[in-house]
Amino acid sequence: MAIPAALAMRTIKSKPKVSVGKTTTSILLATGLGAAAFFGIRALVRRFKKDIRERQALTEGNPANFAIRLVMAFENDNAFGWGTDEESLFRTLEQIPTASMMRKVGRAYRDLEGRNLAADLQSELTTEEFAIANEIINSKR
């Protein structure tokens, strides 16, 4: 038993060492710092956009105001605390005057929630309700 253990120890000690050069280390460090800076700046920009949209939401008729109303319809806190308020959602979609404003509302929604409005509509509504919402959106000129 002692011979295999000694042989294993000698094999481990004689194994060649792997070393990383200074250049490789510097490149890896710079890449990591660059990625961290990118994601940090991106988070700050997103937070800045969200803050602006939240202030704009106080103005009636602003795209951010419509986006906040859609968010509130999705997060309907009724007596049971679950479900989407479809009536409020459809009413808000109908109040958006033009297709151009609808695109602005979609951008405001993305800035506020970090998600796509169309995808949220599809996930929150039944197939029939989603078709009604699409008809309302597509009827805008």
Image (tube, rainbow, N blue to C red):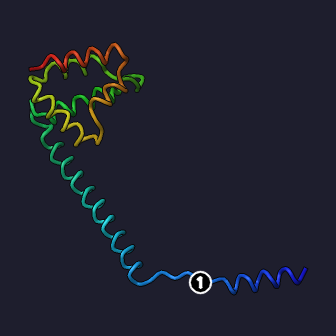
| 17 with respect to 40 (left or right) | right
Query: Foreground residue, 122 or 80?
Result: 122
Query: Foreground residue, 82 or 4?
Result: 4
Give the percent coordinates (x, y) of residue 139.
15, 16
Q: Amino acid at mark 1?
A: Lys
Q: Which residue is mark 1?
A: 17
Q: Residue at x 25, y 22 (%)?
A: 89
Give the percent coordinates (x, y) of residue 32.
36, 69
Task: Note whether 52 is above or below 57 in the view shown.
Answer: below
Give the percent coordinates (x, y) of residue 39.
30, 59
Q: Quadrant of the N terminus?
A: bottom right
Task: Note whether 9 is above or below 76 in the view shown.
Answer: below
Quadrant housing residue 16: bottom right
Q: Residue at x 19, y 38 (%)?
A: 107
Give the percent coordinates (x, y) of residue 27.
36, 75
Query: Foreground residue, 31 or 50?
Result: 31
Task: Note whether 24 is above or below 111 in the view shown.
Answer: below
Task: Note whether 76 is above or below 104 in the view shown.
Answer: above
* Residue at the farthest right position: 1
Q: Quadrant of the C terminus?
A: top left
| 119 with respect to 46 (left or right) | right
Quadrant housing residue 74: top left
- Around disc 1, counting alpha carbons within 10 Å, would you say few (fewer than 14), some (14 to 19), or many (20 or more)? few
Query: Foreground residue, 95 or 6?
Result: 6
Q: Residue at x 25, y 18 (%)?
A: 133
Number of disc labels = 1
Q: Residue at x 89, y 83 (%)?
A: 2
Determine the secondary structure under disc 1.
loop
